[in-house]
Structure formats: C-alpha cells, structure tokens
Image (cartoon, coloured by chain):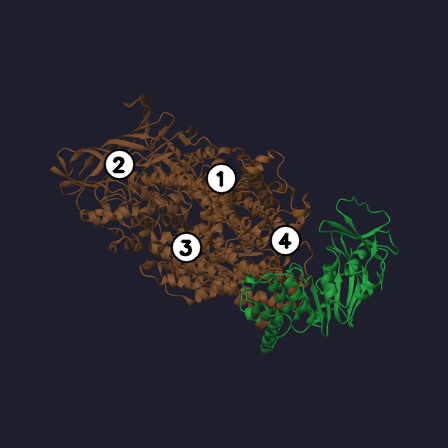
Chain colours: A green, B brown
Amino acid sequence: MLTIRQLSKTYVNGIRALCDVTLDIDYGIFGLLGPNGAGKSSLMRTLATLQGADSGSIMFDDIDLLRHPNLIRCQLGYLPQDFGVYPNVSAFDLLSQLAVFKGIAPQRRRLEEVKHQLNVVNLYSQRNQKLGSFSGGMLRRFGIAQALLGSPRLLIVDEPTAGLDPAERIRFQNLLADLSGDRIFILSTHIVEDIAALCPQMAILRQGHIVRWGSPKVLINSLQGRVWTRKVSAAEPFIPAPEWSVITSRMVQGDRYIRLLSDDSPGKEFVPVSPDMSDVYFTALLEKAETIEYT
Amino acid sequence: MFLPIFAFELRYHLRRPTFWLIAVVFLVIGFTDILSKAGAGNAFFFVNSPSQIFQTTIWYTIFGILAASAFVAETFVRDSQFKMESLVLATPVKKKDYLATRFLAAFGIALLAFSSYLPGMILGTLMPGLNLYALGPFRADAYTTSYFMLAMPNLFVVSAIAFAVASRTRSITVTYVGAIALVMLYLASLMMVGADVINYQQYRLWAMLDPFGFYAFEEKTLTWTVHQHNTLMPTLGGTLLWNRLFWLGIGAGVWTWAYRFYRMVLPSKEVGERASRAWILGSKLGSSRSPSPLLDRLLSIPLPPFLSPLLPLSPPPLFPHSFRLLPSVFSHSSTFLHRAAFETRLIIKGRAFQLLTLFGLISLVMAAIGTRSFNYSNPSTDILVHSANIYLDYVLFAIIVIYAAEVVWRDRILRIQPIVDATLISNGALLLAKLAALFAIISLNLLLAMAVMLGYQVLRGYTNFEFPLYGQMLFLEHGSYFYFMATVALFTQVITRHKYAGMAFIVLISLIHIPFDSFGWYHNLYRVGSTNDIEYSLMNGYGRLFVGHLWYSLYWGLFGVILMFLAYTLWPRGVVDGGLIKRWQWGWSQTKGVVKKGLVAIALLFTAVGSWIAYNTTILNTYQPPGKEETAAAIEKKFKQYESLPMPVVKETNVTIELYPDEGYFVADGEYVLENQGDRPIHELHLLTFINLELGDVDYPGATLREAHPEWGYYIYDLAEPMEVGDRQRLAFQTYTPKPQGFRNHVDSDDVYMVYPNDVVSNGTNLYSPFILPFIGYTKMVEHKKAWLRQKLDLPPLDQRMRSHDDPLGQSQSLMVTHLGWSKTTVTIGTSPAQTAVTSGRLMEEWREVDGRGRDRRYFRYKSTTLDRGKFTVFSGRYNVFQNTDYRVPIEIYYHPDHSDNVKLIAEQVGQALEFYEATFGPYPFKQVRVAEFVYYDGMVFSEGGTIGIPEVLVWKSEAVGDGRDHIIDWVTYLLAHAWWEDQLIAADVAGGMTIRESLSAYASTLYQRSTQTPTEIKQARRRLMRQFFRTLGKIDFQEPPLTDIYNELPIARHKGGMILTQIEELIGQDNLLIALRSFLEDHRYQPAPYSTVLDLRDSILAQTPTPKQDIVRELFEQVITYQVGITDAIATPLLDGGFEIELHLDAQKIYTQNLGQQDSVPLDIPVTITLENEAGNIIYDQEHQLNQQYSVVSFEIDQMPSFAAIDPNYILPSSFLQDNRRAVRTEEKSDR
C-alpha cells in the first residue's frame, strides 16, 4: 500500500505543483489523469524519489519514501514521460548497465534478467541494434523493459502512450495490462481511454489538487442521470445559458453536440445520456477547487 | 558493482571515435614534435633528454586538458544530455558507483588517450635521418617519472575540476571554460615569472599558481648546464613538490566538494542541459517570455522576441508580400542581421562568455604587467600587444574552436533545428550569422585586450596612445589569423558533421606546421593561415614586410570565403540519410547555379592572388635563399684551400655610401689602400662579400678576374705584377645590395632574421662595414665551430677550432677581421633628406644636393682623427639629437623622437663613465662619443671608434628605475669601454681573442658602477648577474670554453670574464689588478703585429700576483670553474658568559666543468669569507676561512646573538646556486646543560 498524505510542492519560480495531495494506492494498476500542467509528472517524479516535497509524507508499506529513497529505489521501476538513451549503445548493453545500477550484480542473473525483459517487451531480436536507430514505440518498450528490471514492487509509468500511433498504443496498453501483477503500478496519462481500458483505481489531478479519486465505474455511476446532450446544427446560433455547466461542445460532421451537466433536464431539446469516462474527467475539471468530491 | 560499471564505461569510450581521435592526435604530436626538433638539429640538446621529456610532458598536458575534460565532462553530462538522468536516478545505484567509479573510468580513459604521446615520442626517436647530436640514450626512467610526477597529477587536477563543473552544470562547454581558466593560470604565471628577466623575488609564488607545474619544474633546471639537461633526472622536491601537493590537494578538494554536494535527485529546473545552454548562450534565455505561445508549445522553451521575425508565423510588417512571394535582398540581409545579432547576443549574454571575459581580463592585466620583463620596457603599445598575443594565441583560439562548435550544434541540441530549417531563412543567412557571431567574439576579445592595455598605460602614466598602431597590430597583424581560423572552424564543423571531429580537425590544422617543419616545407601557400614573417619595429614600423603579410592575408581571406561557400552548399539543412560523401553530394546538387558561379569566381581570384604570391616568393625572390650558415659552409668547402695564401691588409679606406632608405638598398663606391705586410710577394687577390652583398666594378692596376662565384660572393683576381713585401696599392671597388622587389615567403631557414644585416630599412638602418665592403681573402670566420652544425651542413670535423695562441699567422692578423690593421678611414654617406647619417670619426662636412635622378639627398662626411681599426658602422634614421658638452669630449645622442626618456641619463652616464675610465685606464682616443639608435632586426650592438649603436628595444625604452636603471647604465658603459679594449689595441686572430675586449669592458663597467653604488646595491647587482648568466648557460648551443679558448662565445667572454676578473681583484687586490690592466694596455696600445692575445692579458695579471696565488689565477683562465658555497645549517648555542657558540655547517666546492657541462667538484682552494649579522643587520663577524673539505663544520664563539650567517656574502665566487649563501641562525640550548 502506498499512502500519500498532504503532499505539497512549490517550485522556486512560484508554481504550486502539488497541493495537499492525499491518496491511498493499493496493489494493481492505478491511473492518474489530468490535463497538461496539472502536476502529474511532479507527483510521479516525487513518487519515483527523484524530487523532494515541501511537506507531507509518502509511505510505501512501512518505508518512508521521502526519507529513505534508496530503500524504495530497490523496489522501484520508473519510466519517465520524457527520457532518452545513449544513441550509440546497443539495447542489450544499456539495459545490462541499468541492471547493474539496479543492483543486479551477479553477471549470470543479470544477463538472464535482461534477456527476459527484452523478451517481455518483444525487443529481443533487436537487442544488438544501436538505440539511436529505435523508433518511438520501440524506445517506449525499451523504457518499459528497463523499468521492469529486477521485478519492482512499485512501478511508475509517466504518460506511456503519448505520441504513439493508435495501433502501437493498443499493443502498449495490452503490454501494460499484463504488468499489473503483484505490484503497485501507477500510470499517469492525459488520455481518458487509457484509464478506462486499464485502471481499476484512478484519481484526477487538477492544478496540484486531487479532484476525483476512486474506481472509474463508481465515478461514472455518480454522474448517472446528470448528463444531457443536444445536437445544434451549424446554421443555428448557439448561446449557452449562463447557468449551464457545459461539459463538452464538439463538432461532429458539421453539427455541434453539446453535453451538459445538470441534475434536472436543462430543456426540451436535451436528451439524457449515460455518462462515460470523459464526462467524469471534464466535469472534474469544471469544478472550482473547493468542491473536491471523494467517492 | 565496481567492475561492471567500470567495464561499461571503458567500452563506451573505446567505441567512440573521440577516444581514437584524441589518441591519434597525441601520437602525432609526440611523433612529429621529436622529428621536427631532432631533424633540424637543436645543437647538443638531446630531444629525448630527461629534462626535455619533462618539459614536453608538461606542454602536452596543457593540450591534454581539453581531452581530459572531454572524457570526464562527457561522462557526467551524458545522462542529462541524452535525458537518461531520471532513468538512472530512479535506480538504487549508489553515489559511489555512479560518481566515483565512472570518474575513475573517465580519468583512466583520458589518461590512456593522452598517453599515446609516449609511443609517439619513442617512435619519433627511432626514425632514421635524425641529427645524432640531438639524440640521447633511451631513458625509460625519464618517461615514467615524468608520467607519474607530471602527466598523471596534471590530468587528475584537470579531470577533478572537469568533474566538479560538469556534475554541477551538466554542460560540456562550461567545463571547457573551467579548463581554459586553468590555462589562463598557467599563462598568468608565465607572465609574472618573466620572460627575459626572471622575477626571482616572487618566483615561487607564481610557480605555485601554475597548475601544470612548469615553472616549479623549471626552477630546478634554471641553472643546469647542457650536460646536466641531457643526463640529470629532475627530482621531486622543493617548489615542484609543493606545487604538486598543492594542486593535487586542490584537485582532491574540488573533487570531494563536488562529490559531497552531488545529490542523487533530478536537478532543479535551473540546471540540466537546457538551462546550461542558457548558461552558455545568454542568461536571460530561460526567463524571457515569447509573444508566440504556439512556438512555445512547439519548442517547450521560451524564445526571445527577436527570433520571431525569422519565422514565417509572424512575417515582418514591412513588405509582407515581397517577403512571402519572393525573398528580396532586403529581407535576406535583414534576416541575416537579425540572426547575427541574435547569435551574438546569445553568446555574449551567456555567463560562460562573461566568465571567460573576466578571466581574459585578469590574464591580460598580468600580460601587461609582465612586459617589464622585456628589458625593463616601459608599457609601449608594441610590447603590450606582443605579450597579450601570448594570451590571444592560446585562449582566443580555444574560444573560436569551442564557440564554432557551439553555434553550429546549439540548434540541434535545443531541438529547434527542424523548426529553423523549415523557415524561409536561407542557408547563407544562417551560416553567415554564425560566422558574424564568431567575428564579433573575436573583435570583442581584441577590443578587450586593447582596453586593458590602454588602461594599463594610463595607470602607468604612459600617455603616448597609439590607436592606429593598436588597430594595425591587433586587427591586421594578429586578428586576420583569428578571423580566418573562425571560417576554418565553422567549415570543419559543417563538413565533418561531428562536433568533436570538427574540433579535432581544426586543432590538427593549427598544428600542421609541426609535421611540415619536419619535412622542410616552409611555403606559406600551403601552411594554412600563415603569412610571411613580420615583426613590428619601433623605428621602422612593419617596413616592407607588411606588403607580403597583406597579400597572404588576402590569400587566406579568399580561402576563407571559399570555405564559407563550400560550407554553404554543404550546410546540414533538414535530414539527409547516408554517409558523409552522399550528404555532400546532396548539398552540392541542391546548390543554385549562381552560387556555384560565385564559387568559381572566388576560386579564380584565389588562384590569381596565389599566383601573384608564388611569383613574388619564388620567381622575383628566391623561395629559400641559402642562409648565412649554408653560405659560410659553401665558402669553407670551396675556398679553404686558399687559407694560407698571403693577402694584403687594408691601411686606408675611403668610401662613399649612398643609402636609399625609401627604396631599401645602398651602393658603396670606395677604395682601399692595401699593403703587403707579410714576408712573401702576393700574386693573387681574393675578395669575399657578405651574404646578400653584390660586388660591382673592381679596379686594381693589372688585375684580371680569374674566378667569380657570385652565389657565394668569392672572387679571385690574378695580379699582372706581384705585390712585393711592403708595397702599397689602391683597390677601387663598388658594392651594393640589390633593390628589393616584391616580397619574400620567409627570409631563409637559418639565422638571418627577418632582414639581412646589410639591408637598408626605411628608418634606423645600421650597416657594419665588414658586411658591406669586401673582405680581402679567405677568413676562418666562415668556419662553423659547432660539431653538430658541421655535421648538418656536411662539413668535415674541424681539426682546430681556432688558431693556437702561438700561431704566427694568427698573431699577424686581427681577430675576425683578418684583413684590417691600424688604418685611416673617410666615409661619405648619402641618405634621404629627412635622415641623419652617423658613423665614427669627426664630421667634416654636411651638405645637400640633388642627384642625377632628381632625388634630394643629404650627405655627411666623417673622417678618422686617430688611428682606427678600419671598421665602422653606419647608422641612418630620422633622429633627434641630444648633446651634452659637460664632459671632456662632446656627447651626442641620436635617438628616435619617441624615445627621449632615457637620453639625458645615457649622456650623463657616458660622460661620468668616460671620466672614470680616463682616470683609471688612460685617455679616450676620440674627439666625441656618439650613441645611435637603430632597428633591432639582427639583434646586435656596436661600438666602433667612439660611436656606439644600441638597438631600439634595448636601452631606449627601458624604465630607468631600480634594476631597469642599472640595466641601461650597464649596457652603455660596457659599450663605451670598448674604446679602450677594442679601439686602442688589436686582439690577434687566435683562441681567446674575444676575451680581451669583452671581459675587460665588462669589468671596467662594473668597476665604474661600483664607484656609484652602495654595498647592498653591489651585492644585488652581482646576484642578478650570476642568476642571469647561469640561467643562459643551460641554453647555450656550444661547450662552455675557458677564457683562453673563447671563439665568439660572447656571453661567456663578457659575463664570465667579468666575474673572473672581479674574483681575481678580490684575490690580489684592486690596485694590483689595475696596475696589471694598465700595463697590458700600455704594452699593446696601437702596436703593430704580432697582436695581443689573452695569454698576454693573463701574464700581465700574473706579474702582479703573489706567487702562491699564481696557479689559482692561471687556472681561472684555463679551466671552466664555478663554485658552490652554502650554509646547510647555522646553530647558535648560548654560553654561560653571555656569549654564543656558533656552529656552521658549510658546503664549499670548486667545480670543474668539462665538455657540455659535466661537473666534478673538489674542495675549495681559496679562503672564503664568512659573516654574521645581528638582528639590526649589522655585521658582527667577518672572517676569511680556509675550508679544506667539501662539507665541513666551523665553530667559533662570539659575544652577540647573530640572526643571519652568510658565506661569500658579497657574491664574489661565480656560483649558479645562491639561495644558500645566507641562512637564518637557529638557537639551540646545549643538551648536556
């Protein structure tokens, strides 16, 4: 169990990245959702022991993560959002070196582990290729392989699917789904579908605050009967009424589809729809910081 | 953990081309350095002697720092640069493994790559065809000791600092700044230690400052003889030990500090490669906001506002259509200007540049302060620029190399390249903007240098601000090279498309002269960036040398343009797959026709300028004219057979010398009255002319030319009627130097420097008569005395260095100028109307006339008033004249108008010395004393017939305070003394002849100086003289001869001779010595042959020497003797009666030096003075002691407590090590009390 209590972090330039973040994360996949700049990466970096906090605590089982980063690092796998590799070194060599860094000292065990992970991410046949020649998807898989070295109990993966093509993204989602196993696996993303597909538990982060936390199903259910939609043709002028909470307004094939959050029917043109993950996400972003709901 | 990480790092580096590149560079440097030094022959110095190995090792480590920082910095920048940091830091890797192990690996790799100089050097010594005299035995101990003592510590210090900087800033470029700072420290200590004049007071302080230990090492070898240089192993001790410990301490301290404060977390946003870009490229880059949010998101770094006009997203408000549809010239030039300003601003705002500028400022100030070590010079512009150039040569070059890589690769590292590439901006604008930025940096550095120098001049109260000269020296003479190198640096970056390959390439290009020298390839047409030799003279400016420099600069400038055209076509825009060649082909195929045409046009222009240079340097002038050494060797080979033929002697010279300063030549029409002073009739007459001198019409009754060898200047005439013994006959002749045409590539390959000694220059000409008038007969003077030089020039070994003391032919001829005896001289000199011509003799007439070609001319006729030596020096320049008539004869100073500072002092000192010499040695024979200034090109001084010539750099601009004043007085009075010891007697052409004039002039000068000095000043002067003299001994390229065997070893004859006479004075008393010298002069004054020899001088002294000391005096003439006296411990023990028992542990040796400085020591055979001083500095004990052991203990009792003990306190005994002559006395209670 990973227990985060009142974690806050303000950068030197005044930006408040994390604000009183409190979360309990259990074994299994946990999704962290939020727009750009919400503080996802800050939280992930902090969980990955790469950055300190101003206040608050993080306990991994009974280890204080902020105080004893090296104890955590022994059980940690981390794939940052933006990472690089030595371009002129082969995948095998670099992975093997990182295995050394992870403390897998005996050579035979290390080589086996490296081979195994390369197989897991399906890069074994390209193991002697220089990393400089890897495509974006291959690099991402290499990233996963290095994160998995030493079978970490805490796996932190920051925006793993960003920038991947749709087919590669599905393959990657499948790969991630296989990794949940016996570990805490925190996955951050700003892509709603990733969460829906992968995570039994999730939280939404906005401007450093946790604004939703729970299982996707429960969160979606909480909107049941409150989401309304209507089609507005392109010719028609559309002026939203001031009291409406517009969740989304999307152009689809020349028509505008409006989704509203409302406890009652906002008008006769509107029909109720069943809520989805996007509604959860966008309504969470609509709210003022004070109205944090825990479910 | 250690091994796998270490092994990975080693593999990583070994696979990178950088490692191999650097290893090859050091291999080549070591190899070619040995080849060029040993191939050309560097006298008797072994190029692989221990001290040479040590010295070059230190030199290489200075270059090695760039390599070391490349490996170490790369290791600690790599993870950040490749964005792997968060991957690595999230692992439980220990700090020890991540930092220490990887540092060890990087350091090991740096050491390994650097160490290739060792096989390079050793391989070099094994090459065939090297000068045998320059090669010593293989000394494995020297290679290993220097490696452990110097190479490893130096690389460690540099690596530690690189580690500290790189691990903190995550930036390679900032690390290079740190490395440059170390080089600057080295340069600073170079400046402060002093070049010509060593700053002994602060030597150790500045030697400690030098991170490479060069000066700490040199302190050990400062007084070594050639033999010691060749054989001795420098030991680790004294300043060198402290320097090593100090810098190892600094290295370890810095390393530990960086290690301790390194945190195994991601750096805050201020650090990291991007932020360090900001560090390098403008501190505001990270914080200024861009008006273009879209770009922001694209680039994820904010851009300064002035970038936006470059991008199509926001076209400039003016002419939007023309910009979009057809990029006009206006928009090209405006984008270029914007871009150039942008690039420059980025660099200038970078803290790296600001730091470099600060370091540069400090170094330049030190360079300026160091100028005093050049003959105590005042801070004149030329000398300031000269010393700043030492700084510029290293540092500005490094800045160019680093920033060229930086401007080319920055966009890629920032990942902004694709965006810039996709804009309308042309490759030309991109490239030229980068070039303009480099040019701006160079100009800023040069301006900074200028500002520092001007500031220094103001501080020193020197107000002769020569702005045009600053411009000319900094920007035209030196700057043109740097501007050119900037184009080469950009070009190498573009064509190699590899940052380090590009950097290595330009460094190799800049070192290309090393292999070229070893092959003897000197033509500047292919020595990239080099021009003909030029040197600024205070009187003559750059003279005609500047023309060639400008042509070469134009040539290389055009070459730079071609490189830029090529770089333009090959500019790495966008992404092109495939190898280097394929990418070049692609670039070429993309190039527009008009550009290609432009390239062809420039190439044609380049070829035309190159052809013009080739025409001037190979057709109009000989590419490699035979030098003085070669010419002399040829004369010896061909004409030595005539050595014993009888030749007449010049009894009278009448000559008219027409000087044409503006055109650079002269014509001399003259006649000799010759006399057969021998005992045989003379049947043939041989004339010999100096190098570069042409012989015109010769008229001698009944003479017919039998052989002419104009290339060697040797002519043989048969006489129709023999010249009988005692006959006199007139010989009319014309000599001239050819009028210079065009310019030369270099003057030649040996010791004729810049201009020939008989070249006429625009201002400050000096012509020594033996170099401009014919010599009669063969002279032994042409024979090279140095065995290594003889071998190099393919001459047989010399059976006799000089004629022996009793050789009758030698005794009948005067030293060096064998054809001259006592004679009378009339010299008429014509020169340009603005100049004054000066020579020896009374000025009889002065007039002006217009010559046949309508040129206004000014004439001077000088005539000797007493017998003279038949030789004279002609000076001509735009002089001011200062007269002093307070003394028995008028004193006239002819000086360059800018150099009036010391004129009064010079005249006064000449006058006072004249009175002193007349009172001590007898009357001065001439009607006046003249002192004339002239250009320094050939580095000579003159004193003939009461006319003294001193070059512009020597005395005229020295600061007349402290040692500087002594320096002026020493030179002037030494040259004046020649009027007694050169002009009143003739030294025979036998061994030791030069000792007479030199030792006696030096002794006379010190005798005069002592008459005006306090005892402390006398001591200081002796100390200074000994230190300077013994320092030069290690640099001489001949065996040190004893006084009786000197040929032309002038420093020995002058300084050692003077010291020995001072020692003899101490031994036999001043009165006795002066009686001896006066009687020697009396015996030989104006005497005909046989002329005087050094043995006559010795015998005159022996006649005044008490018998027991005669052997000592004789030995001082006949052996090379120095001393080592010192106090190793001084103990005072208080006695019950209030007195003290003194115990002195003494070192007292007489040292015989043989061959190239092999030394054997024996106990001292003369008494030596020991003194004690009390706290107030008063002498409380002063006794002579006879010490019979090399190491002995002397005890005695005195009644006062002494503070200092001294042995040989007045520095009478010539000794190379003076530090231990004086020692503080320590007190010790008696143990049995």
Pick whichever, B426 or B50, lies toward us.
B426
The amino acid type of the residue labelled 4 equals Arg
Q: Chain of mark 4?
A: B
The amino acid type of the residue labelled 3 equals Gly
Pick whichever, B1171 or B353, lies toward us.
B353
Q: Position of residue B44 (x, y in %)?
A: 35, 57
Q: Tag 3's secondary structure?
A: loop
Tell me the distance, in whole angstroms, between the alpha carbons under discs 1 and 4.
Answer: 36 Å
Tell me the distance, in whole angstroms, between the alpha carbons under discs 2 and 3.
Answer: 36 Å
**Depth-wise, is mark 4 or mark 3 nearer the camera?**
4
Q: Earlier in the sequence, mark 4 or mark 3?
A: 4
Q: Are marks 1 and 2 on the same chain?
A: yes
The residue to which callout 1 is attached is B474
Evaluate if marks 2 and 3 touch, with contact meaning CB atoms under 8 Å apart: no
The residue to which callout 4 is attached is B274
Q: Earlier in the sequence, mark 1 or mark 4?
A: 4
Q: Residue at x 49, y 33 (%)?
A: B468
Q: Chain of mark 1?
A: B
Evaluate if marks 1 and 2 touch, with contact meaning CB atoms under 8 Å apart: no
Q: Horizontally, is B1183 left or right of B278 in the view?
A: left
Q: Quarter of the image for the N terminus of chain B: give it.
A: bottom right
Tell me the distance, in whole angstroms, between the alpha carbons under discs 1 and 2.
Answer: 40 Å
Q: Which mark is residue B1034?
A: 3
Q: Tag 2's secondary structure?
A: loop
Q: Tag 4's secondary structure?
A: helix
Q: Position of residue A272 (x, y in %)?
A: 83, 57
Pick whichever, B1233 or B926, lies toward us.
B926
